[in-house]
Amino acid sequence: MTRTVKSISILPAYGLKAAVALAGAALLSFGLSAAARADDLAVWDDQTYEGQSAVIEQLNKEFEAAHPGVTIKRTARTFDDMKLTLKLAVSAGDGPVITKVNQGAGDMGAMVKEGLLLPVDDYIKQYGWEKLQSDSVLARDRWEDGKFGVGKTYGISGLGEIVGLFYNKKILSDAGVALPQTFEELLADLDKLKEKGVPPFMMGSAKQHLALHMIGAIEQAHIDASNRAELDDLIYGRGGSWNTKGNIESAKLVQQWAQGGYFFPGFEGISGDDAVQLFISGQGAFLISGTWYFGDMQHNPDIGFMAIPAPKGISKPMSVGGVDLAWAITSLAKTKPTQDLAGAYIDYMVSEKAAETWANAGYLPATSLAADAKPKLTPLLSSGIEMWKTLNANDALGHYPDWSSPTMLKTIDDNTPLLLSGNITPEAFVDAMDKDYQAYLKDKK
């Protein structure tokens, strides 16, 4: 997933002395030694948006309050910065003990191969994480002998993610356009909006990955969950080809939109995050992106969220998504007490209490809320939770295409501007993806 704000390094203030004294007994349940409790705990996360960062700060303070002597040394990095620096920092011995890590082959897969991450299966059993999240979700953090989705588990996520269709109710209403129920209706709506001089889609392609999410979301909305095996095989490195009619048609459609005036003017010079802020300010009728923007989007009550409308004949359409970057323990956790402290920290980050805190802030937790939880759900989050339930019930939670090889994200990023500008054909765009993937499969043998 993509997180893009300037990297920041934060050391939360240590406080709540009275609460610390009262919470000391809670330490016994974790079986932590005094030496472990005295250590600073170096943690890297990718929660760089203002709303997300506030939640992490709150959760960190609560964890410190329950663990006297522990000080969390937090470093927040963007998704792209994390990809560039995490593996190198851990290899050099000056990285985090606990980190968020992208689950794909280029990140978690590569770090597991080099022995830079520790399995968390013992903590899954100790804390009952398998009761908080489904096995199909936990499988996205498993690697073994270069194989994705099997073997030991190397992380667990705190947030669920769905890529869907944000829409501005007021703009649609003013243009006399109804909310689309099928993909065919969406295409008709886009034409009506363009005819009325309203930018149908907000887009920004200078930085981040809005175009990638758009292409993937459209392609996967055309796949019925009953036919998901081919996509699963691609993502989990089992084989297959990206060179399919569905992928080519999706790339072709997005290219036509870019060339035909369906995107916000000047999108080539706008970053993804800036495009989101423009959308929040009331520019553009639709935007395809993910639930990680809920915290920002809630500031405009006219914005709603829905799944990409499926074409006729698809009863259980898939949606790009899954979970955010996983919480993981690095090889820098040298001692058992440090590892156990890390396990306790991650347990708190995926707890029902943390899930309720995230929900109160407007974000979609991966952990189910407690039966007696009463979070203040925003309309956006209510929509997201219902979608999350439906996707899991239908086994229709899809994948990020870049997870399929260590270099796929770069391959897509390098070729997306060429696709949108018309400098390469949709066939060439998909062929570049497939060449990357086939080279990865060959190297695995």
Image (cartoon, rainbow, N blue to C red):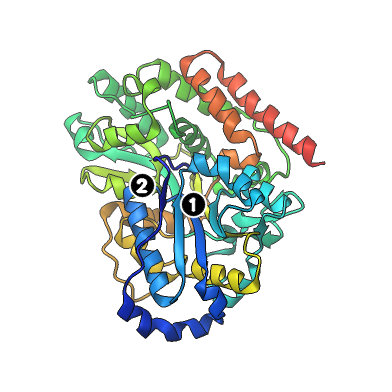
- The location of residue 317, given as percent across then percent down, is 49, 45
* Front residue of 31 and 318: 31
Q: What residue is pinned by disc 2?
A: 49
Residue 7 picture quarter: top left
Vertically, is 315 above or below 17?
A: above
| Amino acid identity at mark 1 | Asp
Q: Most extreme residue toward the top, as rendered?
A: 423
Numbered disc total: 2
Q: Is residue 443 above or below residue 127?
A: above
Callout 2: SS = loop
> Circle 1 sits in a helix, a strand or a loop, which is it?
loop
Residue 164 drawn at (x, y percent) = 41, 42
Crowd around label 2: few <14 · some 14–19 · many ≥20 (10 Å): some
Image depth: mark 1 or mark 2 in front: 2
Question: On the picture, is 108 further left or further right than 164?
Answer: right
- Position above or below: 158 against 181: below
Mark 1 to mark 2 CA distance (whole Å):
14 Å
* Residue beneath disc 1: 324
